[in-house]
Amino acid sequence: MRNQQVLYVSYDGMTDPLGQSQVLPYICGLADLGYRFTLLTSEKPERMKAVGGLIREICKKHNIDWVPLIFHTQPKLISKVYDVRCLKRKAVALYKSKKFEMVHCRSYVGVDVGLHLKRKYGVRVLFDMRGFWVDERVDGNMWNLKNPIYKYAFRYYKNKENNYVANADHIVSLTEAGKREVQKWKGYRNAEISVIPCSADFNVFTLLTKEEKQKARIALGLPEEGLVLSYLGSIGSWYLLPEMLSLFALTKEKYPEVKFLFVTSGNPDLILAEAEKIADKKRRYRNTFCFT
């Protein structure tokens, strides 16, 4: 239904690379089709200072009402609880003036806010769950279950997880495997689940010609010919950096001139430190990595 008022809640900020790549493009597209979005987010102060003005311009161009709050980091866990309270309070205030027909909730923090509105006002909730956030915190070594605080948080959010899928009006999963897993949960109540995988806009990310690839190699200081492994995205946590570097080490045994190109906003020292664990000496690899 076009022209309906939609609240989009995301704990991921629009000033973060993830928000700019995975959220803003399709909200802008839907807004251009006539949907009226209010975008409620938590933003890191340093990122807000750097690119907040650009995000405001984008939102203004597409008639999106962006409401950024502060993303707090300390004290751990408690700051998250505080951020959720701030998001809920702001969402209620926004609802009173806009009477949203639906709230699109990105991940677990977002759906916590959305279900708060549903309980108070009966707003329909779209739970865009992305991944299994609770398990990801453990798998990524961010929540050590030997710590009683994190152990409590894990159990608390596992219970909340069932409540989320039980009360959502519609659920979005990234994969068919994720959909099948949710359907097994005791809290699942037959809400429709749409599978919407991540994708790329080839109007933005165009396929390069051979000539353009050669220019890019020169600009990055890479040889014009030869094998180049590349990685684009964040590093650390569950992104398998040790496994990638182990693969690189094996590849180098067969192709001695191979290079590894990292395109990341992460710290190159983290990559080199991990490489040091695999290599006999760091200098063996220092000149084979490229960073941008």
Image (cartoon, rainbow, N blue to C red):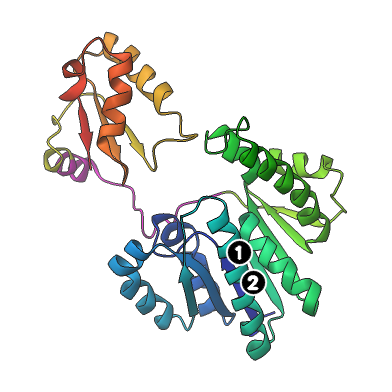
Q: Is residue 169 above or below residue 90?
A: above
Viewer-nearest residue: 80 or 189? 80
Say few, some or many: other residues with alpha carbon within 10 Å of mark 1 (under 14 / 14 to 19 / 20 or more): some
Task: Report the residue at 50% width, 34% height from top.
Answer: 238
| Mark 1 → mark 2, Cα distance in angstroms | 6 Å
Find out whether the residues at labels 1 and 2 contact each other: C-beta distance under 8 Å. yes
**Nearer to me, 42 or 123:** 42
Tell me if residue 39 is in the magenta stretch.
no
Quick one: SS at disc 2? Answer: helix
Q: Which amino acid does label 1 sit on?
A: Val
Residue drawn 38% across and 77% down? 56
What is the magenta range? Answer: 198-216
Q: Residue 214: within the magenta?
A: yes
Horizontally, is 133 left or right of 192 in the view?
Answer: left
Q: What residue is pinned by disc 1?
A: 84
Q: Can you say whether 14 is above or below 146 in the image? A: below
Residue 169 is left or right of residue 189, and the answer is left
Q: Name the residue under label 2.
A: 88
Magenta region, mostly helix, strand or loop? loop
**Residue that protrudes farthest toward the bottom in the picture:** 97
Q: Residue 215 carries which label?
A: none
